[in-house]
Image (cartoon, grey):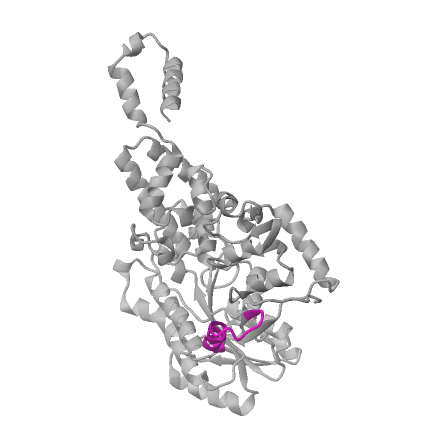
Amino acid sequence: MGVSAVFNSRSLDFATELMQLTNGEGVDVVLNSLADEFIPRSLAALKLNGRFVELGKTDWNADRVKTIYPNVNYFQMDLVELCQQPELIQIMLQDTLNRFQQNIYQPLPYSGFPITESVQAFRTMQQAKHIGKIVITQPAPEQAVIRADGTYLITGGLGGLGLLVAEWLVQQGAKYLVLISRHESEAATPQIQAWKQAGIEVVTALIDIAEQSQLVELFTTLEQSLPPIRGIVHAAGVLEDAMLQQQTWEKFAAVLRPKLLGAWNLHQLTQTQSLDFSVLFSSATALLGSPGQSNHVAANTFLDTLAHYRQLLNLPTLSINWGIWSEVGTAAVRYAETRLKGVETISPSQGIQAFEALLRSPLTQVGVMPMRWTEFLQQGIASPFFAELRLTQSAPAKTSNLLQQLRFASESQRRLLLQDYLCGQIAQVLGFQAAEVDLQKGFFDLGMDSLTSIELKNRLQTDLGCVLPATVAFDYPTVNSLVNYLIGQLNLGRNRLEIVAKAQMEPQENGKNLSHLSQAELADLLAQELMEIS
């Protein structure tokens, strides 16, 4: 790059070397991201009226620098605050991109390690053996290519969802289909005939996949007559709804057999086969719960768990927690019952689009649900699945309520309210339960870093309607110290209820009779008093 003098930033020798190189004058500018003893040595290496630009978060400031180094111009740059100016950042990024495209800028050197060698990557960094950055790489997910020389098996293959997936496979180039069902379907016959006329070999197998012997017999036959199985879609399922008091083991077994036993049998029989994909059609009920469908929830929860188990065995598996499809699927008839709950349906075209995208993703489990969240959450659903969900439009009402509670609470109550609120916010930022937050323990001992500290600051500013410094979590690093700081910052003054009570009990305050004042005049007088004490 043409730089003639390069120094080592892992020792303090650079400062002496710089002064020698500049004949004792020093340098014009220090752009600093180091800490501790490196700061005074860098300051000492500046020439008269040189500039020190600080990018980090340290205990140095302009006043301290001016006291020790009066001939240094000190500037702090808060990159987090700058990033909150989207127009400026957009211009800078575009300019940077243009310079890369023109080869004016070159990427930093880096050493790449696959994620399987993460331990070695950290050892390399610890021993300072690298130049530039260390990058942990995740292997790109293999694209799910539909092969003309592979067989694709679909359970529930004669149902609406099964036929929909089969049609997509044909469109992608599949030539061999195996459609498994327990019963014949006259509705599926025209479609199957059309595929056969187009040169697609379609095998319809009327078996019960919950019976392993029947599945073994089918697999033996397929091995002798068709190419190897390359993909499986397990879409079989039935519904036997009833409230728990009315549920029977027969109803439970009817739902568990095709989903649970069917999936397990497929897993056992294909563990040694080279599958490109194996997709389990689970249900959103496993995430959300569903009254009257305890058996359905249990069966689909098993599918989700099986997907994660197979991934641990390095077997390609995806479990999709589908919402309700319109027009096809056993759950479509239930849409009228769930519409008012804020749950929309998935159209066949939307579902196939999602299926195609997910088939090419590295995910193990994902929910696909068109939702009207505001309406859905108004029902007060208590599922822990929604613990991290925050709706922007509902925040103002919540915020206003919190501030109102704080203003009308006693001093001791305010502390408890703020403690509970802070524990909840810290827990959301760090990803654990509010009860786990130690009031005396430092935020950074709990796992907070510079990024999550900024997220916490932004949450507090929004909810409490006040401006806080970017370093608030560093300056007040425990719940108790932050509570003390916020009480002072919010300027809540004395308890308003106490003031109203005092005005009612002492109408002759300051020699004035307040009984003749109107409600509006009393409100103005109260506001003035609050201003004076806040």
Residue 322: x %, y % from top left:
47, 62
Q: Residue furthest right?
A: 102
Q: Is residue 120 left or right of residue 226?
A: left
Taking the image as shown, residue 3 lies to the left or right of residue 530, namely right
Quarter occupied by residue 282:
bottom left
Q: Residue at x 54, y 67 (%)?
A: 358
User: Can you give x and y, in whole percent of width and height, for residue 423 in the image?
Assistant: 34, 49
Which of these two is toward me, 150 or 447? Answer: 447
Rendered view: 37 above or below 190: above
Location of residue 130 (image quadrant): bottom right
Kindly identify the residue that appears in the image at 37 percent across and 70 percent down. 302
Which region of the structure is painted magenta?
117-134
Q: Is residue 447 left or right of residue 454?
A: left
Q: Name the foreground residue: 240 vs 234.
A: 234
Q: Residue at x 62, y 67 (%)?
A: 6
Q: In this rendering, does residue 234 appear at all?
A: no
Q: In the rendered image, which quarter contains the N terminus? A: bottom right
Image quarter where the C terminus lies is top left
- Asked whether 274 or 496 is in front, the reply is 496
Q: Position of residue 65 (x, y in %)?
A: 51, 47
